[in-house]
Amino acid sequence: MQRYFVPEGNWEDDELIITGDDSHHVIRVMRGDIGDKMICNHPSGYAVLGEIISIDQQCVTLSIKERLQETVELPVQVTIAQGLPKGDKLEYVLQKGTELGASCFIPFSAERSVVKWDEKKASKKMSRFAKIVKEASEQSHRNRIPQVTRVMNIEGLIAETDEYDVKIFAYEEEAKTDHFVTFASILTRLKSSQRIVVCIGPEGGFSGNEVALLKENGFKSVRLGPRILRTETAPIYVLACISYQFEELGC
């Protein structure tokens, strides 16, 4: 069943209104008609079953039939801090990371990031990112749309995540040594409802200065298995492991 995220101002006691691109999708793409049912999510995280009662060129009005008892969110809040990668890799991370349950994404500019963030194009880029996570949330039947923060430097990232319960960064040099902290050992100590931030470097990895700065501010370096992962693969690996730990094993 089709799902839409509806802004808070479009909700009333027993009705809601779908507008903008979503109303166009209902009318033109899904060929919606009076009596059709769909799931609508409120920004606070709950979902309802709605039935179309009227359609015009600008909006679709639904009556609320029932509040659904569902939750598909990860029991831990996972933030992926992603060093700016080349090409469309960040969009890939946003899309797949949303499907796998990330609650927030923090893109950051690292010393070895090949791509430089263009502030003149920031507004257009952020709108694109917001659209990607919204559509991925609808496709994967999420209850919430993940937040995508503005792009920041590593100092901003450290300040943004100061109060997180668990702070780690994937360090490729850890995979080459005999003495390392495994990601699995972090997961076994992670508890439901805690907030964890996982920091992933760009293609060139973290510089020595960045490693020192992260460690000085409470981040622990971990090894994501014995193989070196691509920057866009690492966050997918992380989220899949967390999902398995908490949703399959029930830990």
Image (cartoon, helix red, strand yellow):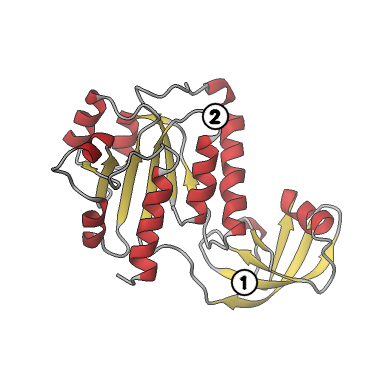
As helix, strand or loop, the secondary structure at mark 2 comes to loop
Along the viewing direction, whichever of 73 and 86 lies nearer the viewer: 86
Is residue 171 shown left or right of residue 126? left
- Please count the marks in the image: 2
Q: Nearer the viewer, mark 1 or mark 2?
A: 2
User: What amino acid does circle 1 point to?
Assistant: Val
243 shown above or below 200: below
Is residue 54 shown left or right of residue 98? right
Q: Residue at x 26, y 63 (%)?
A: 191
**Would you call the spot at circle 2 few (<14 residues within 10 Å), some (14-19), or many (20 or more)?**
few
Q: Residue at x 79, y 72 (%)?
A: 36
Q: Residue at x 55, y 58 (%)?
A: 43
Q: Which residue is mark 2?
A: 87
Q: Residue at x 50, y 52 (%)?
A: 98
**Image quadrant in which the C terminus is located:** bottom left
As helix, strand or loop, the secondary structure at mark 1 comes to strand
Residue 233 visible in this rendered orientation of the protein? yes
The percent position of residue 176, horizontal first and vertical second, equals 22, 37
Q: Which residue is mark 1?
A: 48
Along the viewing direction, whichever of 195 and 247 lies nearer the viewer: 247
The percent position of residue 129, horizontal first and vertical second, equals 56, 40
Residue 8 visible in this rendered orientation of the protein? no
243 shown above or below 135: below
The percent position of residue 225, horizontal first and vertical second, equals 29, 48
Distance between mark 1 and mark 2 Cα atoms: 38 Å
Is residue 232 shown left or right of residue 214? right
Label number found at residue 224: none
**Image quadrant in which the N terminus is located:** bottom right
The percent position of residue 140, horizontal first and vertical second, equals 57, 60
Choose top left, top right, bottom left or bottom right for residue 9: bottom right
User: What amino acid does circle 2 point to?
Assistant: Gly
